[in-house]
Image (cartoon, grey):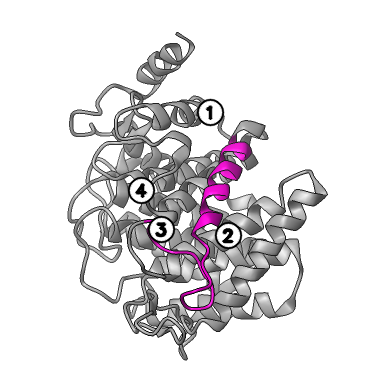
Amino acid sequence: MRYLSIALLLLFCLGDSAQAAPPTPAVKPSTIAASPSLNHAQAAVDALQQWYTPANGLYWTTNWWNAANAITALANYSRVSKSTKYLPVFANTLHAAQTGHGGFPGFINDYYDDEGWWALAWIDVYDLTGEARYLQAASGIFDDMQRGWDTATCGGGVWWSKKTREKNAIENELFLAVAASLANRVKSPEQRAQYLAWAQKEWEWFRDSGMINSQHLVNDGLNASDPAHCTNNGKNTWSYNQGVILGALVELNRAAPNPALRTTAAAIALAAIEHLSDANGVLRETSSAHTGGDVPQFKGIFSRNLMLLDNAFPDRRYQDFARTNARSLWEKDRDAANHFGFWWAGPFDLPDAARQSSALDALIAAVAAQPKQQR
């Protein structure tokens, strides 16, 4: 009955339009200035939450792992706006996404990267609320992720899936980010030491794996046809692969300061800004693939993690990049209902929760990049 009450409260606060196209949010485009602002982010949140489905704690129009990123974006928005409005959403998702249709108990499924996204989401919600249950959820997820570590192929690293034999960048970046984040938040010195040991082991392996190429960009994964001599697979340098490692290195440096971590993070960030942006400085993918629920999520993940790097080591180039992308989203990639599309430089293509939460990440990053008095 307690969870039913939460669901009813959410339906009242957020609307019950999970089975219909989102209506126009209350904030009209014509009423908001063009300069990136918290109002822009609020408009994006209003539209995003029209897709929220209280019954399963997820987001209609997109997938399981994308919902974790939407929750992360919502937590970050709540932090920068100092809003408590969405606290019931986090509580509901913690319960409903494990028990509702399409959910997984403990946020454990067959993919270690999916697990990593949920662990990071609950760490962000823990930072926002200070409630131990969210950190406990992240710790439980990481306990399962550890089982994916293997040294027989490529000398280390976490498998992408529990059913197939692939070692890619994303699940290992997430493993590093979760381990270092937990090391920075648990109270027990023994637990902290264990998480830090995992983070350092993962980073040493990842750094030497060959996935970071000569341009300082991270390729998609490894060619493991010779398990004893794995090599960079030369596949796409997705924007999210450049992003997650930034946040991971920030957390690792916080846990165990090392100037080399900042140097590496800066090199990757600036390489991504240079090579993954168009002539106007707007982020894009180097692949033309943009269908489905995966690729539309990627660019926001980069923006979010660049924000984390800038928070730790402020750099005008990161801040300019954030503002440029938010401005382009608002002016060129938005419909009348404040939905955002895939092409941040325009034109708007179609609305869904992956595109919307990705854009929200970029809008929040621009707010964070503003001097405090301008927020």
Horizontally, residue 263 falls left or right of residue 27, namely right
Instruction: Give the CA distance from mark 2 to mark 1.
Output: 24 Å
**Does the segment drawn in magenta span residue 137?**
yes
Q: Earlier in the sequence, mark 2 or mark 1?
A: 1
Quarter of the view holding residue 99: top left
Occupied quadrant, residue 30: top left
Q: Which mark is residue 177?
A: 2
Residue 129, how many percent across, how many down? Answer: 63, 34
Q: Return the residue at label 3.
A: 300
Which residue is at a point 32% across and 79% down the rendered structure image?
235
First-in-chain label (4 vs 3)? 4
Camera-near label (4 vs 3) is 4
Magenta range:
134-162
Q: Amino acid at mark 4?
A: Asn
> Between marks 4 and 2, how big is the CA–CA gap?
17 Å
Q: Where is the N terminus found, in terms of image quarters? A: top left
Disc 1 is placed on an element classified as helix
Give, as a three-letter code, the residue at label 3: Gly
Name the element at disc 2.
Answer: helix
* Secondary element at image label 3: helix
Marks 2 and 1: which is nearer the front? 2
